[in-house]
Structures are given as C-alpha cells and as structure tokens.
Image (cartoon, rainbow, N blue to C red):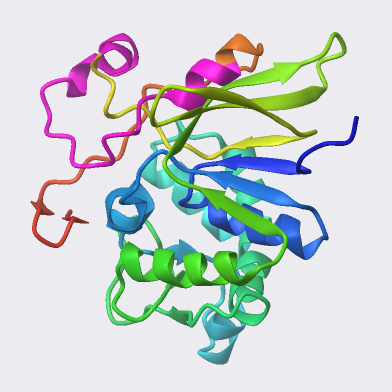
Amino acid sequence: MSADVDLVVAGAGGGLVAALRAAQHNFDVLVVEVSKSFRRGNNTSMSTSMIPGVDTRWQRELGIEDSPDTFVADVRAKTRGTGDLRLARTLAEVSGPLVEWLADDIGLPLGLMTDTWYPGHSVHRCHTVEGRHGSHLIDHLVARVRAHPRIDVLVPVRLVDVVVDDTGAVRAAVIEHQNGAREDISTSAVLLATNGFGADPQLLAEHLPEVTGFTYHGSEHSRGDALRIGGRLGADRAFLDSYQGHGALVPRQATLGR
C-alpha cells in the first residue's frame, strides 16, 4: 500500500524548516501542530529568532573570521566542557549553508546582528529577521509552507505515536484530533520537532528537579511528546538535565529576556 505522505513533521516551529527542505526534494509532507495559536504561542515564536551561522557570506563581507573550531570552542567555554562537542561541530559545519539556504532558497530576509553581542559567542554569527522576534520568523515560514503544493498542515492535531514494523521501519504516524478521535497516517518517516518538556511537571521533577519552582513561560504544549514517543521506540536520550534560564521576560510581547 502506498503511503499517504512521505514525511510527517510533528511541530510547527523549527519543523517548518524541515518540511520546506523535504518538499524541495519532492517529498509530500504533512505538518501536524497541536496549538491553534502556534504562530504566537510556541517556543520558536517567543524566541529572539537568532540563527547562528558559521562562515556565512554576511560574516565574510564584514571581514569576520569564523570557523567550526571557533564555534566548538565557544560551546566548550559556555557549557564548561559539559556539552556534546561532536554534535556542536556537526551543527557548526552545516550552520552556514543552512542560513544561506534559508535566505536564498526560502526567501527569509535574514541579516547578521552586529550591534550587540549574543551571550556565549566570541564573534558575530547570529542571523535574524527584522524585528528580531520569533513571531516574525514563524510568519515568514508559515507563508512559504502554505504556498508550497507538497506541504499540508493540520492544526490543532497532536502526534501521539509512531507505528513501526518488525524491522523498525516507520509505517504510520498516529494523530489525535481535538475531539479525541485518532487516525493513522501512512508514512515512511516521522520528524519529532515538538520542543522539550518544560510544561510537564512530572518530567521536570524526574529530569530537572532544580527548576521545578521556576516560572515556565514557554509553550503549554511542550510536554515531552518526542521524549515519550522516542523512548517507546528505543531511542537514546541524553542531556535531559540541561536548560537555558532567562532572568527576565516580557509577558505582553511573549518575549524571553536574559
């Protein structure tokens, strides 16, 4: 039986970028998102929309020297040696092409932020959209996703499980509609882009007890869906005790502060 879609993406934040990339390679994509107000209420929309990119053309035009080695050194310093430096290097090596692809192929109006230093970076490498707010970034991405003939979006729908066969190959994504009805979407791949578990007190108590008394200002739907689904499928888990704390927030603008 043929698949309903080639890829199911759970989460309409950074997952929108993955959907656009897959569609560019002629895959049919379904994005499922649980929040009706995701354009203003998910964690990407609340961010400062800073996208680090190493050795981009914007940096080169300004004579800023950057490299994966420099990026990894910054991660090592900021995490005091506790970060996954192999992962940091992998991300650093693809970050420059990613930022340029977002600008050139997707059409995001990106520029390099040079008027202030983002904490932890030794050189200017954070690229952002005008307004420097995640909601503007989400708006750009949503417009491009909705205009693409190979991408469909279902909102509000939650991914609740992934069906695999005896070999471990993905066969279906199980989604739950707002009325509680469940549906199997036949697919050969699922991307879990549902953010973290900051809105789930039980998971916080298990993995991050030191922050259980903190105010969580992120998405109410960040409840560890990917953690649970991935765990059931036997995925490895690491660095669950890591978090980024903000000393201030601006509730009216839904913006995280430092």
Residue 76 spot, x, y in % from top left = 47, 43
Q: Is residue 159 above or below residue 117?
A: above
Question: At which x and y percent is residue 89?
Answer: 63, 48
Quarter of the image where one finds residue 48:
bottom left
**Closer to the camera in the image, 141 or 214:** 141
| Residue 162 drawn in magenta | no
Residue 198 or residue 149, whichever sits in front: 149
Q: Position of residue 66 (x, y in %)?
A: 57, 70
Give the magenta-colored segment's residue range: 202-230
Question: Who's the residue at 46% across and 72% down the image?
Answer: 140
Residue 129: percent from left, percent from top:
40, 77
Placement of 9 over or under 44, stated as above or below: above
Quarter holding residue 137: bottom left
Q: Quadrant of residue 191?
A: top right
Q: Is residue 116 left or right of residue 121?
A: left
Q: Choose between 154 and 72: the one closer to the eye.
A: 154
Residue 3 visible to the viewer: yes
In this rendering, the answer to whether 125 lies above or below 240 is below
Q: Is residue 42 left or right of residue 246?
A: right
Quarter of the image that includes the N terminus: top right
| Residue at figure coordinates x 36%, y 22% from the top left | 241
